[in-house]
Amino acid sequence: MTVTADLIEAVGTAIDVIGVAVIVVGAVSVSAVFLYRLLRGHPVAEVYRTYRQGLGRAILLGLEFLVAGDIIRTVAVSPTFQSVGVLAGIVLIRTFLSFSLEAELENRWPWQPRGAAPSAQSGQR
């Protein structure tokens, strides 16, 4: 590998490390807040909902960094058809995970306006 390729590989790896750190630090911090609020006597349903939202946001942000690291390494270092195909699969899976987490966090589908929760019956009048 050339110096440029080594540098780009190092940058991609650094971004991956940042993504993992964001997930770990986010999970630890929202868990600490969860335990603190639970021990202080806050309503369990509210504390749990806040915990899930905070954990989901940490995972989403970490996934964004991980995808960025994969893209940098694949496109800049080894742009073969096989590596781009693997990248496409990784991005597809992570996009689905992000979409699912976002829908759960917001309690609405992305095409619904904010504040509109998905109804149990779509044909409601």
Image: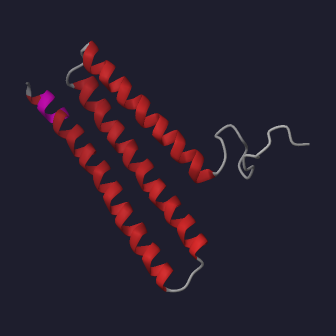
Where does residue 91 sit, x and y in percent of width and height? 39, 30
* Quarter of the N terminus within the rendering: top left
Residue depicted at x 47% and y 54%: 56
Where does residue 53 sit, x and y in percent of width and height? 52, 59
Magenta-tinted stretch: 4-8
Decide: is 30 above or below 121. below
In the image, 104: left or right of 65?
right
Residue depicted at x 55% and y 46%: 102
Where does residue 60 sit, x and y in percent of width and height? 44, 48
Where does residue 93 sit, x and y in percent of width and height? 42, 33
Queried whether the magenta region covers residue 122, the answer comes back as no
Q: Main secondary structure of the magenta part?
A: helix
Seen as rendered, the residue at the extreme bottom is 40
Residue depicted at x 44% and y 74%: 33
Decide: is 16 above or below 35. above
In this view, the residue in front, 47 or 68, is 47
Decide: is 99 above or below 117. above
